[in-house]
Image (spheres, coloured by chain):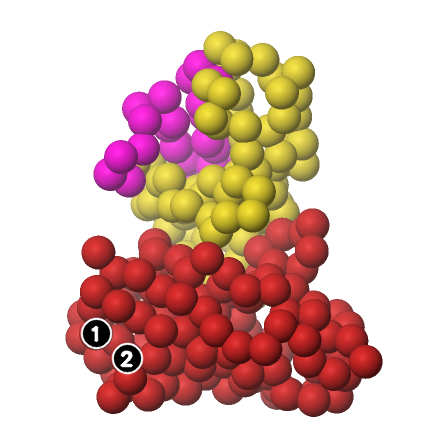
Chain colours: A red, B yellow
Amino acid sequence: QVQLQESGPGLVKPSQTLSLTCTVSGGSITSGDYYWSWIRQHPGKGLEWIGYIHYSGNTFYTPSLKSRVTISRDTSQNQFSLKLTSVTVADTAVYYCARGLGPEAKPDYWGQGTLVAVSS
Amino acid sequence: DIQVTQSPSSLSASVGDRVTITCRASQSIGTYFNWYQQKPGKAPNLLISAASTLQSGVPSRFRGSGSGTDFSLTISSLQPEDFATYYCLQSYSTPLTFGGGTKVEIK
C-alpha cells in the first residue's frame, strides 16, 4: 500500500519561500497513471487543491497560485516537492501531499499533513 | 474554474438518524464527483468516487448519488464514528475544486 509523508520547515518568514517534500513509499512516482498532488487547508477551513506533477513529469497548478508555485520531483529518492514563493500569513495552512488517481487526478492516498506557519 | 457549493455547512444529528449532504457544481460534470470524510487532525479519506462508487472498506450505510450538477451523500443510519466533516470534490476538470465542507455534529 502506498504511503506518503510530508517534511519541511514548520515556520517560514513572510516573503520567503515555503519548501516541502513528500516521500512516497510502496510505489514509484514514475509508474502508473498517477498525479502526485499538493493540497492545503487553512486553519479551521476547507480544502484547496494546489496542483500536481504527473508520473510523466507534466505539471499543473491552480491559477490562483500559479505565479508562485513549483512542483518538482526527485525520481532517485521517490520524492516530489512543493515550492511556494513570496509567502504571506495567508499561506499559513496544513499542507498535504496526495496521490491522484488517473485520469481525473482525484486524490486517493494522502499524507498526514504538515502545518506550515508564516510568521516573522 | 468549476465552483462547487456544498450544503449545509453544518448539521446536528443523533445516532441512527438519516443524514443527507448536497453539492452543486457550477456546470455539468457527469459523474466526476467524489466524497471525502475528514476527522479532526487527520487527512481526508476518500469515501465515494464517480458519484456513487463506494471505496473498499467504506460501510454500506454511505451512499452517493447524482450526476450533472447535483450530487448528494446520504448516511442511512448515523453511527458514532461518522461524526466528522465531509467534503465533496469535482474531478471533471483542473483545477480540482472542493466544496466548503459539512460538519456533522452530535445532537
Q: Which residue is drawn at 36% across and 64% down?
A: A4
Q: Position of residue A2 (x, y in %)?
A: 25, 60
Q: Mark 2 points at which residue?
A: A78
Give the number of the disc on residue A28: 1
Amino acid type, mark 2 = Asn
Distance of mark 1 from mark 2, alpha carbons? 6 Å
Relative to B70, A17 lies left or right = right
Q: Which residue is drawn at 67% across and 36% down?
A: B9
Mark 2, other Cα within 10 Å: few <14 / some 14–19 / many ≥20: some
To which chain does the residue with label 1 belong?
A: A
Q: Is there a contact, CB below 8 Å, between mark 1 and mark 2?
A: yes
Q: Which residue is drawn at 34% across and 56% down?
A: A109
Q: Does the magenta stretch include residue B61?
A: yes
Amino acid type, mark 1 = Ser
Q: Establish whether labels 1 and 2 are both on one chain.
A: yes
Q: Where is residue A86 in the image (x, y as percent from the top left)?
A: 70, 87
Q: Is residue A97 magenta?
A: no
Q: Position of residue B41 (x, y in %)?
A: 56, 48
To which chain does the residue with label 2 belong?
A: A
Residue situated in front as seen by the camera: A33 or A104? A33
Mark 1, other Cα within 10 Å: few <14 / some 14–19 / many ≥20: some
Q: Which of the marked residues, 1 or 2, is nearer the chain's N terminus?
A: 1
Residue A88 drawn above or below residue B83 = below
Q: What stretch is highlighted in magenta?
A: B55-78
Residue B105 drawn above or below residue B24 = above
Say which quarter of the image contains residue A116: bottom right
Q: Quadrant of the N terminus of chain B?
A: bottom right
Residue A78 drawn above or below residue B79 = below
Q: Where is residue A81 in the image (x, y as percent from the top left)?
A: 44, 81
